[in-house]
């Protein structure tokens, strides 16, 4: 930069977080548009970042300054300065679009990321965004070329901030079902009533099912995504899609495609799938069974002995000998045989979505295999940002509200009624059969927090130990409750057993709790199902195990001392389930109220709450859903 051309241009020292350089450079360039600029083709930029991500820039997303002052004093002041003197050049609009993209894409479907701001501040932020986009031309957004800036973002920017309805000119083939000759198309729209027709030659394609997926930006709709499964005509020479009677491009793998391209792809997938054997691989957790996969395996083994099945479990697991004795065909996930069976299997059936399983042979492991997700608990919170990353061919659900929240319209999940089925959970049949009443046992089962345990080790197939766990609020709060004199008094007065069985990710830290002798810690061999059946009341926080008690018509107390933090930092955000309205017991926020409510339950034997009526014959329903994948 030549100093004699600065023309009273200075760094804005108030922009301490971000964009002080962007504002300075663009004002300088605008003032000197008549001069020549040189772009160095082979320039190298050395960018430093702190490994622990503790820098001001790393933490900018947690600072209201980044969302308010940067927009007001950075982007808007730059745009207003330029607009007063001339039309805003494309390069400046592109700079602003680039900067805004990083903010907006972080917040789409994640309003919890602004939980540190009150509603007045959020309203101001939205108003500032509208002011900024006033200066951005529609064509600048459409033509903005930046690899992470997807067509989704273009349509969202235009709808959410410009109130522009853009004619749809393309649809995307997202998925191909080679077994049933079906294709999934999607497109982004501001109008949920667009008329869609898919033609093969002159014949109208059969619609299998559809859904409307909604992308949110704080309290606004960012954009809608229409998702439609169509039957593909194998011998068709022409494939045409009309939206509102307009012929649109069909995109597959980022290229325009024809019916021949899709026919060839289906043929290729069928050829690869033909290498599979009729083998079903079941799995719960690598080190533990006793979940939906074990119960379904047992049912198939007893009722369909002709099926070729195997169960994945570490040899060191406490469940290994028990299942081996029962006749389960077991395979260790660390063995070569496991990888061979994954290679040959047609169906992978699991209650968890673990990388060792679905990426056993690399990222394309599931390309021509069916992945059946049995779940290990009711999905009551919004897990869309995690689950949408996965290929799930059959998604088992246990209750109607849960099913609607995933397969229905206007939610954030990509899954349609084709993939999601309401059957109940395989383990529920045995749970109801083995239930016991009047057992005088309190089961304490809090869930985990991703941000207080160690990071996952692919080599160890589990999370590393995090000594800082003992500095967490979680450890302090649960420890205080378990060590309280009032809890011991209730135990002695009402003669109730107290059982503490936290989430498996918390078990490595149990020793540090130094629990009183009267509190029972079940062995890892103990069946969780047995704990539910033999308990008369549960204390948890957010765990879906509460639904198991609801199935058994047993009450729950929810101890939620860290609600705001959990839904910001953990793997999920709050979904359709409201603990106060829909829960199976009272919600408390502190230890005093927890002990009081527990006392009231024991004193009055008040065990009447909202309960679930589970699906009957869940095992058979799940089996039929799996068998229907190839029909």
Image: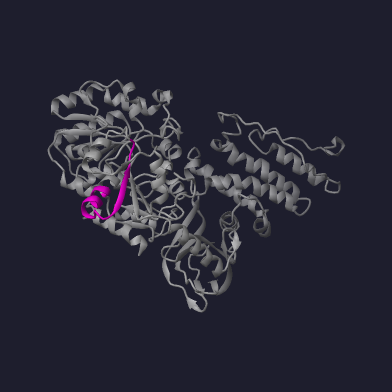
Q: Quadrant of residue 602?
A: top left
Q: Nearer the viewer, residue 102 or 32?
A: 102
Q: Is residue 287 left or right of residue 114?
A: left
- The residue segment tinted magenta is 296-314
Q: Is residue 485 left or right of residue 47?
A: left
- Above/below status of 421 relative to 248: above
Residue lying at the far bottom in this picture: please name it: 202
Query: Percent position (x, y) of residue 105?
Result: 56, 47
Query: Percent position (x, y) of residue 173?
Result: 52, 62
Q: Nearer the viewer, residue 578 or 620?
A: 620
The image quadrant where one finds the N terminus is top right
Q: Residue at x 57, y 45 (%)?
A: 125
The coloring applied to the image is one colour
Query: Percent position (x, y) of residue 55?
Result: 59, 30
- Above/below status of 65 relative to 430: above
Q: Is residue 34 left or right of residue 352?
A: right
Query: Percent position (x, y) of residue 292?
Result: 28, 46
Q: Residue at x 30, y 50 (%)?
A: 309
Is 311 in the magenta? yes
Q: Nearer the viewer, residue 267 or 513?
A: 267
Q: Residue at x 43, y 29 (%)?
A: 464
The image quadrant where one finds the C terminus is bottom left
- Above/below status of 249 relative to 487: below
For the question of whether residue 189 can be seen, the reply is no
Q: Quadrant of residue 532?
A: top left
Q: Is residue 565 left or right of residue 601?
A: right
Is 166 in the magenta? no
For the question of whether residue 96 can be seen, the reply is yes
Q: How many marks?
A: 0
Q: Quadrant of residue 489?
A: top left
């Amino acid at each position: 930069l030549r100093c004699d051309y600065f023309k009273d241009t200075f760094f804005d020292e108030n922009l301490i977080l971000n964009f002080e350089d962007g504002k300075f450079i663009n004002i300088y360039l605008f003032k000197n548009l008549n001069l020549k600029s040189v772009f160095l083709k082979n320039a190298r930029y050395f960018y430093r970042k702190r490994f622990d991500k503790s820098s001001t820039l790393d933490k900018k997303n947690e600072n209201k300054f980044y969302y308010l002052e940067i927009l007001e004093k950075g982007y808007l002041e730059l745009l207003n300065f330029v607009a007063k003197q001339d039309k805003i050049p494309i390069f400046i609009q592109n700079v602003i679009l680039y900067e805004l993209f990083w903010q907006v894409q972080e917040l789409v479907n994640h309003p919890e990321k602004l939980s540190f701001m009150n509603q007045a501040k959020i309203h101001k932020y939205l108003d500032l965004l509208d002011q900024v986009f006033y200066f951005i031309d529609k064509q600048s957004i459409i033509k903005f070329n930046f690899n992470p800036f997807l067509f989704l973002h273009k349509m969202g920017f235009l709808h959410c901030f410009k109130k522009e309805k853009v004619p749809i000119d393309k649809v995307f083939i997202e998925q191909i079902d080679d077994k049933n000759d079906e294709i999934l198309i999607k497109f982004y729209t501001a109008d949920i009533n667009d008329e869609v027709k898919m033609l093969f030659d002159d014949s109208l394609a059969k619609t299998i099912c559809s859904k409307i997926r909604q992308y949110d930006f704080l309290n606004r709709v960012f954009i809608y995504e229409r998702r439609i499964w169509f039957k593909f005509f194998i011998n068709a020479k022409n494939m045409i899609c009309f939206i509102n009677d307009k012929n649109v491009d069909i995109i597959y793998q980022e290229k325009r495609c024809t019916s021949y391209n899709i026919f060839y792809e289906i043929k290729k997938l069928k050829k690869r799938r033909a290498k599979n054997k009729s083998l079903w691989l079941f799995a719960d957790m690598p080190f533990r069974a006793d979940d939906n996969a074990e119960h379904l395996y047992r049912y198939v083994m007893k009722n369909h002995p002709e099926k070729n099945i195997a169960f994945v479990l570490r040899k060191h697991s406490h469940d290994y000998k028990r299942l081996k004795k029962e006749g389960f065909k077991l395979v260790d996930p660390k063995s070569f045989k496991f990888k061979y069976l994954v290679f040959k299997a047609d169906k992978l059936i699991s209650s968890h979505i673990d990388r060792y399983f679905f990426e056993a042979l690399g990222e394309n492991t599931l390309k021509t295999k069916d992945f059946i997700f049995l779940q290990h608990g009711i999905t009551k919170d919004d897990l869309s940002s995690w689950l949408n990353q996965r290929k799930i061919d059959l998604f088992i659900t246990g209750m109607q509200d849960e099913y609607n929240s995933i397969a229905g319209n206007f939610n954030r999940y990509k899954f349609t009624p084709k993939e999601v089925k309401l059957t109940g959970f395989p383990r529920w049949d045995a749970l109801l059969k083995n239930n016991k009443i009047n057992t005088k046992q309190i089961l304490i089962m809090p869930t985990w927090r991703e941000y207080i345990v160690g990071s996952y080790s692919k080599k160890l197939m589990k999370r590393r130990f995090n000594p800082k766990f003992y500095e967490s609020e979680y450890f302090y709060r649960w420890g205080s409750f378990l060590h309280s004199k009032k809890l011991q008094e209730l135990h002695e007065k009402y003669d109730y057993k107290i059982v503490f069985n936290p989430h498996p990710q918390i078990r490595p830290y149990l020793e540090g709790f130094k629990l009183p002798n009267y509190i029972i810690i079940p062995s890892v061999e103990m069946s969780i199902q047995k704990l539910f059946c033999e308990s008369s009341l549960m204390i948890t926080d957010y765990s879906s195990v509460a639904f198991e008690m609801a199935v058994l018509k047993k009450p729950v107390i929810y101890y939620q001392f860290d609600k705001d933090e959990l839904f910001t930092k953990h793997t999920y955000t709050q979904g359709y389930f409201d603990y106060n309205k829909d829960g199976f017991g009272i919600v408390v926020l502190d230890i005093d109220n927890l002990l009081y409510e527990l006392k009231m339950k024991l004193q009055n034997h008040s065990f009447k709450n909202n309960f679930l009526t589970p699906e009957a014959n869940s095992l058979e329903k799940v089996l039929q859903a799996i068998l229907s994948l190839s029909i």
